[in-house]
Amino acid sequence: METNTIFAWLLVIITTAITPAVNGKYNSGSHIINVPTTIKETHLHFFMHDTLSGDNPSTILVAKPSNTVVQAGNTLPFGAVYVFDDSLTEELEVTSKVIGNARGMYASVSRGMDVSLLFSGDLELTSGEFNGSSITVVCRDGPTVVKEMAVVGGRGKFRMAKGFTWINAVYVNATSGDAILEWNVTVFHQ
């Protein structure tokens, strides 16, 4: 019995000696990074074409509520989820120069007759000075014609962006759901 005890203690000592130390702290250390001392402010202006109708819509319904009473006249019942892949253009006309795309989703988050959407989208620019860069917008989208939404991040030249955007619904077809939105964006970035 004594041999087994000695062997067990030797096994514990050897295992402890060859096992690497484990750092159990939540923060494993800090690093010094160079942070730019200036913040750039950029203003962007473009139009987003959100099309639900026709043979080739840019926005489609991917989930609809099953346990919600849909009130008459409410085209966006509580729980409806849409995904979009909309074009961004320089001018109001859909035929004007395409400068990027907006991809994301929105969901109806109001149980009442007031239309309230949760918008989450990545707006990528595909031409000009900011080609390959994008801004990320996540915010509640209310029923007003002109609305303010939050810029919460970005990629490329807009990495770590923050800011806001004023969105003006310049065209809305209540029957089809099609819309053209004018975006005036203020982005603060490195």
Image (cartoon, helix red, strand yellow):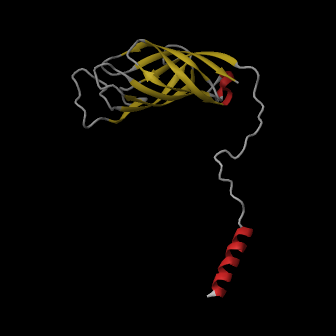
Q: Position of residue 45 (x, y in %)?
A: 57, 14
The residue located at (39%, 32%) in the rendering is 82
Q: Position of residue 115 (x, y in %)?
A: 34, 20
* Horizontal side, residue 4 vs residue 32: left or right: left
The residue located at (24%, 37%) in the rendering is 67
Q: Position of residue 154 (x, y in %)?
A: 61, 29
* Horizontal side, residue 92 vs residue 57: left or right: right
Is 65 in front, or is 22? 22
Is 55 in front, or is 120? 120
Residue 135 position by quadrant: top right
| Quadrant location of the N terminus in the rendered image | bottom right
Total numbered badges shown on the rendered structure: 0
Is 156 in front, or is 177? 156
Residue 109 seen in the current view: yes
| Quadrant location of the C terminus in the rendered image | top right
Residue 140 position by quadrant: top left
The residue located at (76%, 34%) in the rendering is 33
Is 89 in front, or is 120? 120
The residue located at (41%, 13%) in the rendering is 171
Q: Position of residue 158 (x, y in %)?
A: 65, 26
